């Protein structure tokens, strides 16, 4: 089983060019068997552009989370704190190995899914 994450295009691109090694989330999927994330690049791209393996998922208070991830966050400190403004804790998915698709895929046609607000589980056929 894999999970699909909607990620803004600027951040999705940073994941695949190697400048973003953590994907931040306010909430995380409960299934601890998930080892791969399918990346849906949200509007205006609206395509699945690749996937990555999960090294680990870090859960801490916001200040500690930033301290642990800031060097490879791919975002500014201001953006980080604005994103987590209403939270005491947050999650960082550490990216292990990326695989960018040669040809982007359609979430509906290729995965039979609609764009998730947060995430969606994908059971491979």
Image (cartoon, rainbow, N blue to C red):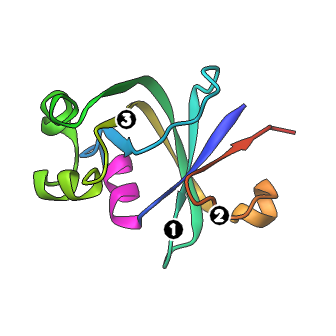
Residue at 58% in and 32% down: 36
| Residue stretch rendered in magenta on the structure | 9-16
User: Which label's residue is closer to the chain start, 1 or 2?
Assistant: 1
Front position among marks 2 and 3: 3
Residue at 41% in and 64% down: 8
- Whether residue 122 sits left or right of residue 45 in the image: it is right
Residue in front for this viewpoint, 110 or 33: 33
Marks 1/2: CA–CA distance: 8 Å
Q: Residue 90's x, y, as percent? A: 34, 37
Task: Please tell me whether mark 2 sits on a helix, a strand or a loop.
Answer: loop
As drawn, 6 above or below 33: below
Q: Residue 43's x, y, as percent? A: 50, 75
According to the picture, the residue beneath numbered tag 2 turns out to be: 115
Number of labels in the image equals 3
According to the picture, the residue beneath numbered tag 3 turns out to be: 91
Q: Residue 97's x, y, as percent? A: 44, 30
- Circle 3 packing at 10 Å, graded few (<14), some (14-19), many (20+), is many
As drawn, 47 above or below 92: below
CB under 8 Å between callouts 2 and 3? no
Task: Please tell me whether mark 3 sits on a helix, a strand or a loop.
Answer: strand
- Circle 2 packing at 10 Å, graded few (<14), some (14-19), many (20+), is some
Marks 3/1: CA–CA distance: 20 Å
The quadrant of the image that shows the C terminus is: top right
According to the picture, the residue beneath numbered tag 1 turns out to be: 42
């Amino acid at each position: 089983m894999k999970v699909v994450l909607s990620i803004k295009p600027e951040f999705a691109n940073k994941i695949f060019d190697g400048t973003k090694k953590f994907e931040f989330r306010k909430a995380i999927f409960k299934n601890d068997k998930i080892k791969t994330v399918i990346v849906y690049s949200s509007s205006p791209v609206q395509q699945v552009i690749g996937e990555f393996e999960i090294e680990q998922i870090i859960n801490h208070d916001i200040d500690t989370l930033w301290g642990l991830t800031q060097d490879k966050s791919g975002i500014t400190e201001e953006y980080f704190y604005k994103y987590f403004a209403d939270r005491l804790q947050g999650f960082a998915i550490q990216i292990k190995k990326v695989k960018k698709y040669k040809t982007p895929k359609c979430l509906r046609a290729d995965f039979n899914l609609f764009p998730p607000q947060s995430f969606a589980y994908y059971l491979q056929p």
